[in-house]
Amino acid sequence: MTYDIHGSWESMTGMNAPLYRDPESRFTWEWSVQDTINLYLNKGVPANKLIMGIPFYGRAYNQVTNSNNGLYQSFMGGGFAISYKNLEANYVNKNGFIRYWEPDSKVPWLFNGSQFISYDDTESIGYKTSFIKANSLGGAMMWELSQDPNRVLLSKIDNDLK
């Protein structure tokens, strides 16, 4: 499972599934998909036995401090999941939400001045599928397929890993 790395159980907003650590993170600890994979590899698990989990949903935070485009800010409530289908239809560059990109972690987020949403899209998944191939991992699994009924993300993964 390489998602739900940050969520509403913490005191500030963070990335749901960052591929790499963000050196600008305000968390006293930071973790990433890469850290998870490397932990298993360093303990002797064969790479081809490791399957990377990829979320087909975003994590939303409400009443976020309007600073740093919502990233690493305090919030009041949220943590609920939003399907990729809903994100694509109603949030990505819509209804006041702007898409931002974290260049170190290789993941996007959305912010509208008060709501922060961490999610994956075809760009971030491209980095993750490249990581899977470069490290000879066994593949990818998704949580969960019903969140992407138009197969936007699933098709990206399928095409990249062929």
Image (spheres, rainbow, N blue to C red):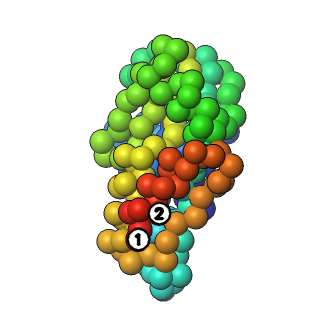
Residue 133 at least partly seen: yes
Image quarter (top left, top right, bottom left or bottom right) of the N terminus: bottom right
Percent x, y of residue 91 = 53, 25
Give the label on residue 39, or none. none
**Vertical relation: 74 (above or below) 51:** above
Q: In front: 89, or 80?
A: 89
Residue 19 appears in which quarter of the rendering? bottom left
Percent x, y of residue 29 = 48, 48
Whether pointer 2 and pointer 1 mark residues with C-beta atoms closer than 8 Å, the reply is yes
Q: Amino acid at mark 1?
A: Lys
For mark 2, what is the residue? 158
Q: Residues within 10 Å of mark 1 (few under 14, many from 20)?
A: few
- Rendered residue at 30%/42% (across/down): 103
Residue 128 appears in which quarter of the rendering? bottom left
For mark 1, what is the residue? 162
Q: Amino acid at mark 2?
A: Asp
Percent x, y of residue 108 = 42, 37
Percent x, y of residue 64 = 55, 19
